Amino acid sequence: MSVRSHWLMKSEPDVFSIHDLAKAPNRSTPWEGVRNYQARNYMRDRMRPGDGVLFYHSNAHPPAIVGTAVVASAAYPDPTQFDPSSAYHDPKSTPENPRWMLVDVKLDRIFTKPLTRERLAETTGLETMVVLQKGSRLSITPVTPLEWSLVLELAS
DNA sequence: GCCAACGTTGGC
DNA sequence: GCCAACGTTGGC
């Protein structure tokens, strides 16, 4: 018996939007391209299948939480790190000693109305959200149970 | 397009 | 191990 955790994962909609996820096979995708150690560690060490994900559009107009998803696999090596033709290729990584891990993420729900960053920032109780902190660049961040329930309440 | 904040690299 | 230089992120 394990308690499910909650996360926020950023994606630039110009690169991969929640609508792209909706069109993906099984509405699921490998979360490729993370090249930050802290974000990797969250996926590798902390995420479990069934964990809840807030899907956030960064570099968007406006930036917003646009839906929810679910962690759909255990962590495994990001295949793009071995692909010389990929923008995410890492020449220092080998299949014997992979540096970058990922999980599969499966779409749960697209909000009918995105929760803009502006709206989140003015919501009492969400001041603590990591994504809202000034200068926060981490693409995967933990979400507390309270933050999770407040966000879902806003989205309902 | 600007630029502050951040993370990484590499010379020493 | 320090830290300046550099590249990237991402809101605005």
Image (cartoon, coloured by chain):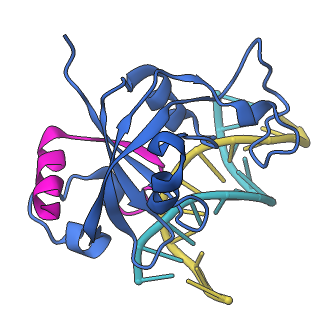
Chain colours: A blue, B yellow, C cyan
Measured as percent of width and height from the top left, residue A83 is found at 83, 36
* Quadrant for the N terminus of chain A in the image: top left
- Which residue is depicted at the point 35% across and 67% down? A64
Measured as percent of width and height from the top left, residue A29 is found at 53, 41
- For residue B10, what is the image quadrant? top right
Q: Is A155 positioned to the left or the right of A138 in the image?
A: left
Measured as percent of width and height from the top left, residue A48 is found at 36, 23
- Which residue is depicted at the point 41% across and 30% down? A72
Figure disc tally: 0
Q: Looking at the image, can residue A137 be seen?
A: no
Residue C6 drawn above or below residue A98: below
Measured as percent of width and height from the top left, residue A7 is found at 33, 41
Q: Is A137 positioned to the left or the right of A84 in the image?
A: left
Magenta residue span = A133-156
- Which residue is depicted at the point 44% across and 20% down? A45
Q: Nearer the viewer, residue A31 or A40?
A: A31
Q: Looking at the image, can residue A18 be seen?
A: yes
Q: Nearer the viewer, residue A46 or A1?
A: A1
- Which residue is depicted at the point 40% across and 71% down? A63
Queried whether the magenta region covers residue A3, the answer comes back as no
Q: Is A78 positioned to the left or the right of A18 in the image?
A: right
* Quadrant for the C terminus of chain A in the image: bottom left
Queried whether the magenta region covers residue A137, the answer comes back as yes
Q: Nearer the viewer, residue A60 or A129?
A: A60
